[in-house]
Amino acid sequence: MNAVAGAILVAFGFFLVGLTVLVFAKPSVAERFFMSFASSARAHYTEQVVRLLVGASVVVRSAVMWQPKVFWFVGWAIVLSSLVLILTPWQWHHRFGEQVLPILIRRMKLFAIGLLAFGVLLIYAVFTTVPQNAA
C-alpha cells in the first residue's frame, strides 16, 4: 500500500511539473485545461476522485516522508476538502470557478511556479523517507 501511494504521489508530482511546462510552453492549451475544471458534473466528480486519491496517498505515505506531520496534515486537508466538494452540488463549484478562474488565468505563470514548487517538493518528500521509528 505504501509503495502504491508513493507511486501515485511521484506520478502526481511529475504531472504538476509537466503542467508547469505546459503553462510556459503552450499557455492557450493550459488555459483550456484550467477552464475545464468543474465545467460539468463529470469533470467535477473526476477532479474530486483524483484529489481523494492523491490526498489519501499523502496520508498513507506521510509517516515515512520528509516532514511527516506536515504531509499528514496536507493529505487530510486534501481529503476533507474533496469530501466537502463531493457533497456540494457541482453547479456551486462551477459558479465559484467562474469567479476564480479569470484571476487564475491572468496570473497563470505565477500559479505555475507554485505548481512546480509543490510538485518538486512532493517528489522530494517521497524519496526522502525517514525510518519508521523516527516518524
Image (cartoon, helix red, strand yellow):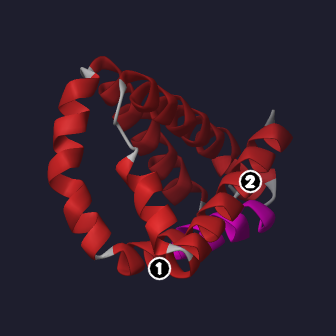
Mark 2 / mark 1, whichever is N-terminal: 2
In this picture, is 61 found above or below 100?
above
Quadrant for the N terminus, please. Answer: top right
Return the residue found at the far front. Answer: 28
Q: Is residue 26 magenta?
A: no
The answer to whether one can see residue 129 in this image is: no
Residue 48 horizontal/vertical position (percent): 46, 32
- Identify the residue shown where x is 65% and y is 59%: 15
- Identify the residue shown where x is 39% and y is 30%: 44
- Identify the residue shown where x is 22% and y is 26%: 91
Number of numbered discs visible in the structure rendering = 2
Residue 36 horizontal/vertical position (percent): 40, 44
What is the span of residues highlighted in magenta in the rendered image? 116-128
Q: Is residue 9 left or right of residue 119?
A: right
Q: Is residue 62 left or right of residue 34?
A: right
Residue 24 horizontal/vertical position (percent): 52, 81
Question: Which amino acid is tagged 2?
Answer: Ala
User: Which picture quadrant has residue 43?
Assistant: top left
- Identify the residue shown where x is 47% and y is 79%: 113
- Return the residue at label 1: 113
User: Which picture quadrant has residue 129?
Assistant: bottom right
- Return the residue at label 2: 11
Question: Which amino acid is tagged 1?
Answer: Ile
> Secondary structure under badge 2?
helix
Residue 89 horizontal/vertical position (percent): 24, 20
Secondary structure character of the magenta stretch overall: helix
